[in-house]
Amino acid sequence: MIGRLNHVAIAVRDIAAASQLYRGTLGATVSDPEALPEHGVTVVFITLPNTKIELLEPLGADSPIAKFLEKNPDGGMHHLCYEVDDIHAARDRLVKSGARVLGSGEPKIGAHGKPVLFLHPKDFNGTLIELEQA
Ligand SMILES: CC[C@H](C(=O)O)C(=O)SCCNC(=O)CCNC(=O)[C@H](O)C(C)(C)COP(=O)(O)OP(=O)(O)OC[C@H]1O[C@@H](n2cnc3c(N)ncnc32)[C@H](O)[C@@H]1OP(=O)(O)O
Ligand SMILES: [Co+2]
């Protein structure tokens, strides 16, 4: 079911500083920041030869990553995103297996304009999983 690793997400307090770290110190190609108010984050993507790094900064009062940053003040690895061929079939299989699909259970459009879902970290070895329609 899960396919390519689409991205590894890192929550950061200051996305401009983190972008400069990747662009300057690590010599990476970093996209411009994109505000995603419907997801409560501002994101940039760092394109690597085999996957992407997503930097996330809280946006708005009830950002889903605010509590994560309270617990991890320096930032940290936030989630992994796997691609799936059919996100509804994946959702149905996961619900049937007893895994918790976060939010309404209906995919929302993510940063790449594709439907995404999130799975509870407590069901997946303490790791927040995002699924994105390939
Ligand atoms: C979609 C746009 C973009 C894209 O790529 O396209 C994005 O990726 S946007 C990413 C931001 N959006 C989300 O993260 C949505 C899904 N997240 C959530 O629904 C919540 O953050 C949730 C449910 C994972 C955690 O909710 P909350 O922080 O309010 O609850 P707690 O702090 O009580 O956490 C419960 C429990 O889970 C542990 N936790 C929380 N976040 C993570 C994490 N990222 N990785 C691992 N574990 C996590 C937290 O420590 C608590 O554990 P406990 O042992 O009870 O302390
Ligand atoms: Co993501």
Image (cartoon, rainbow, N blue to C red):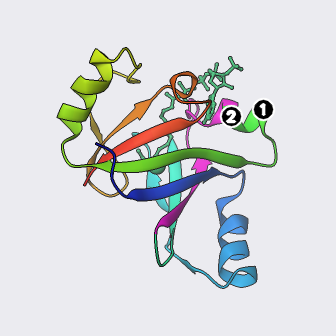
Q: Amino acid at mark 1?
A: Lys
Query: Around disc 2, counting alpha carbons within 10 Å, would you say few (fewer than 14), some (14 to 19), or many (20 or more)?
Result: some
Residue 59 is covered by the magenta coloring: yes
Q: Is mark 1 within 8 Å of ligand 1?
A: yes
Q: Mark 1 near mark 2, Cβ–Cβ under 8 Å? A: yes
Residue in view at x 39 percent, y 49 percent: 82
Would you place residue 5 above or below residue 106 in this image?
A: below
* Spot occupied by residue 58 in the image (x, y as percentages of width and height): 60, 44
Q: Which residues are magenta?
A: 51-67
Q: Quadrant of the C terminus?
A: bottom left
Would you place residue 85 above or below residue 28 in this image?
A: above
Q: Amino acid at mark 2?
A: Phe
| Residue 72 appears anywhere in the view | yes
Q: Which mark is residue 68?
A: 2
Q: Which mark is residue 71?
A: 1
Would you place residue 120 above or below residue 22 in this image?
A: above
Residue 109 is covered by the magenta coloring: no
